[in-house]
Image (cartoon, rainbow, N blue to C red):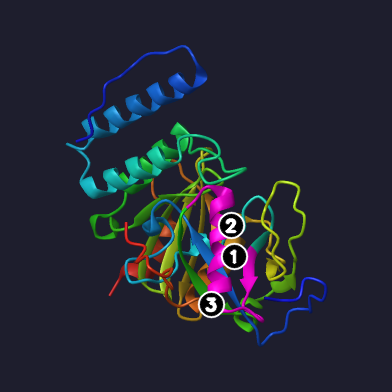
Amino acid sequence: MITMERKFGVSQAAAEVDQFLQTVTELNSETVTFSNHSLVDQLIDAYSEAQLDGWDGDGSVAVARETLQVARELVDGLPTAYRTPEISAEPDGHIELIWRVNSRRILTVSVDASGLLHWAALIGDEDPRGTCNFDGQTPATLLYWLGRVCGG
Amino acid sequence: MIDPDNVPAVDLDETVARYVLASKVSRLVFEDGGAKPQLFYPYKHVDLSVNRHLDCTQEEVWRFGNGVAEHQGKTLQGRFDISVNDCTIGSLKVEASQIKDHPSGVPDNPNHADVIGFPETKADQKVLGLKLAEKAGKRIPPPANDGSD
């Protein structure tokens, strides 16, 4: 459990830090109902690393709170067998989730703040990819390819 | 290193390095040493910086990486080597892109090159990132640093 003292300030930076701490607090409070604590830790790590613009050099974009929320809902809605992604922030402000058996059985999904999921996979010689909207339920297309990557 | 006054075109037989610049190596490298596809996504521009091995000693290869890391305020966590031929996937190709007198102070580098020709959509870029990461093999850690988190 992450605990931090909250300090209030009037600057934008202080407001951003305060919002971050609030988000971490909320995520921590939700781990009771969240089935995989390590995924919450990964989401917190990704969000905390990329909470400010410029976090990965010039032009890199902070991960928005909305992006974090979409990623959390996506992960939380996955079938238990598929709750094994590696999660990290991307310089364009997306959160990336990767399921990997090996380098030729791998699926990556980038979540953006608008709820779009940009995904691609390599499965043998197949290289499917696409973009779909997340409406609170895991898109059937993603479930299919997750099954192809993570299934036996 | 390459003669700055005579930078040749990139040949398919060459090898280029993609540096791993991150506070934590695990953001860009899998536990088994394989590259995460994100390392090979172009961002901001639709090209990807790499460093040619041509005419370079190992010491020079690392020196170029350290120069970029220092300029960007990041930690050099290693590099992945990949052949130019393996970078030539679909619309991608590698072009020499010497850095000289860069306005923002990026160190001069006659061995710098760009992988160009990435498509515009994120999903299409991700597929190419997956394929480049597969070809890149395992991370080569920097000397005197195992790069662990």
How packed mark 3 is, by other alpha carbons closer than 10 Å (few <14, some 14-19, many 20 or more), is few
Residue at 43 percent of width and 73 percent of height: B140
| Element under disc 1 | helix
Q: Position of residue B51 (x, y in %)?
A: 63, 70
In reply to whether residue B62 is colored magenta, the answer given is yes
Where's the N terminus of chain B, which quadrant? bottom right
* Disc number for residue B58: 3
Front one among A8 and A121: A8
Circle 2 — which element?
A: helix
Name the subunit of mark 3: B
Q: Residue under mark 1: which chain is it in?
A: B
> Would you name the residue on which mark 1 appears?
B64
Does the residue at mark 2 contact the one at mark 1 (Cβ under 8 Å)? Answer: yes
Q: From the viewer's perspective, is residue B27 above or below residue A33?
A: below
Which amino acid type is marked by label 1?
Phe
- Write down the quadrant of residue B97 in the picture: bottom right
Quarter of the rendering containing residue A149: bottom left
Residue B116, x across and y down, in percent: 71, 66
Dot 2: within a 10 Å radius of its alpha carbon, few (fewer than 14), some, or many (20 or more) residues? many
Return the residue at label 2.
Answer: B68
Query: Marks 3 and 2, how far apart in space?
Result: 16 Å
Type of the residue with mark 3 = Gln
* The quarter of the displayed image where residue B63 is located: bottom right
Q: Write down the region rendered in magenta.
A: B49-74
* Nearer-N-terminus badge (3/2): 3
The residues bearing labels 2 and 1 have C-alpha atoms spaced at a distance of 6 Å
Q: Residue at x 42, y 75 (%)?
A: B138
Which of B57/B18 is in front? Answer: B57
